[in-house]
Image (cartoon, helix red, strand yellow):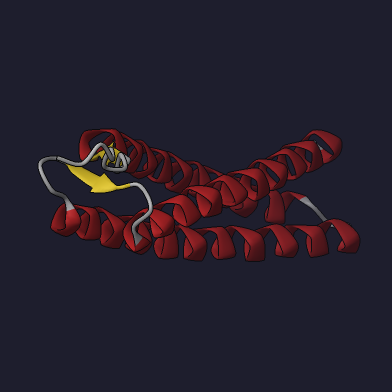
Amino acid sequence: MSSEVAPVVERVYVKDLSFDHELWDNEMKFYRNELEIFEHRLEQDVVRLTDKEALRKLEHFQNQFIRQNEVLDILNKKVRQNRKAIGRESIEGSVFHNSVTMEKYKALRSEFEVFEKIYFDLKKEFVDFNHKHF
């Protein structure tokens, strides 16, 4: 009989990862809704502003809102793919902590955090612009 102890294989529970996926889904819906509100405000702003520099800034915001929607499309696809991969890879409701799928999950979490930082900065910039001009 060997006295060696088998190494502990660290696992992560799928239900914990599912929580993040669900949270991301809800946050993406919220951001899309908020972007629609911002786009509606842009439509109102463009008829009220005459200053060329302010109009150029509005075009910048319009382009950024389009880009944020594109990024949300990409993130949404990645979240769906990651959710499916985790489901396929799960054993007894968990996945290996050091698996490729978990590494993709961690990268996705980081990517989502970067998106949120960029989004919040853009939101602040847009709100500040509106406060300045109206």
- Residue drawn at point x = 36 percent, y = 53 percent: 102
- Residue drawn at point x = 65 percent, y = 66 percent: 63
Q: Position of residue 100 (x, y in %)?
A: 36, 63
- Residue drawn at point x = 69 percent, y = 57 percent: 61
Q: Is residue 123 left or right of residue 73?
A: right
Q: Is residue 11 left or right of residue 61?
A: left
From the viewer's side, name the closer residue of 100 and 42: 100
Classify the position of the N terminus by image quarter: top left
Q: Is residue 8 left or right of residue 41?
A: left
Q: Is residue 85 left or right of residue 29?
A: left
From the viewer's side, name the closer residue of 70 and 59: 70
Examine the rendered structure and indicate whether residue 102 appears above or below residue 73.
above
Quarter holding residue 26: top left
**Direction left: furthest residue:** 92
- Residue drawn at point x = 41 percent, y = 59 percent: 104
Q: Position of residue 45 (x, y in %)?
A: 69, 49
From the viewer's side, name the closer residue of 63 and 25: 25
Q: Position of residue 111 (x, y in %)?
A: 54, 54
Q: Position of residue 96 (x, y in %)?
A: 28, 49
